Amino acid sequence: MICGADEAGRGPVFGALVVAGVLVENDAELIRIGARDSKQLTPNKREVLAKQIKDIVVKYEIMVIPASDIDDLRKVMTLNELEVSVFSKVIEKLKPDTCYVDAADVNEVRFGKDILSRLTWKPTMISKHKADETYPIVGAASILAKTTRDEHVRRIARELEKKINLPLGSGYPADPITKKFLKTWVDTYGELPPHTRHSWETAQNLMKKYKTKTLDKF
């Protein structure tokens, strides 16, 4: 049995980190339906493929780490260590003979070894950068992670957008729509919105500017 594992939402200032894993006997059916890197697919195509993948695979696992949990965990570990922990939990549930992972660490071999060190058995581990572009089974995992993350962001948007009548955007720090949403929320409420990763530099800088501006008024 082989598995693939990938994440979605490593970089955003909003919302959860999602790690997904899929288990199959071989990847022939995943190749047939066109499973590949989720970033190369339209949102509609990802949704269609996600349903097909869930029907095809022997088993799949999805772990969602909310923003507040990410902040708590980052007090005691790096983001790479957090991902190693979550990847290993997903893979542990799947119990493959061979595992393909999209390496989050700049050192792809180290990322694989770190995951292996946390498993109760030792599958063959292939840890590569851009594995979702190379291995259809990792592409399938990336699709499940991305569609789960997208639904999570949609729920956040429905909850928060009505409070300040502005779109949330993608949730990424570089997104001007997200930047405007965050700044307007902080200016309005004097605090970061729910589901924000407080440990992110973008969020911390925004609060520093707000507090400085507030102090200057006195």
Image (tube, helix red, strand yellow):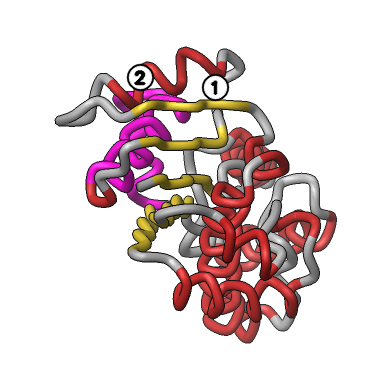
Q: Which residue is mark 1?
A: 105
Do the residues under discs 2 and 1 have CB atoms within 8 angstroms? yes
Q: Residue at x 42, y 37 (%)?
A: 99
Quarter of the figure that contains the C terminus: top right
Q: Is residue 66 visible?
A: no
Task: Tell whether 2 sits left or right of 107.
Answer: left
Image coords of residue 68 (percent x, y): 37, 51
Dot 2 or dot 1, earlier in sequence: 1
Q: Position of residue 203 (x, y in %)?
A: 59, 43
User: Crowding at label 2, few (<14), some or many (≥20) Cα neighbours within 10 Å?
Assistant: some
Is residue 127 something that shows in the picture? yes
- How would you classify the magenta stretch by its main secondary structure? helix
Q: Nearer the viewer, residue 123 or 43?
A: 123
Magenta residues, start to end: 66-92
| As drawn, 11 above or below 113 | below
Q: Is residue 198 above or below residue 82?
A: below
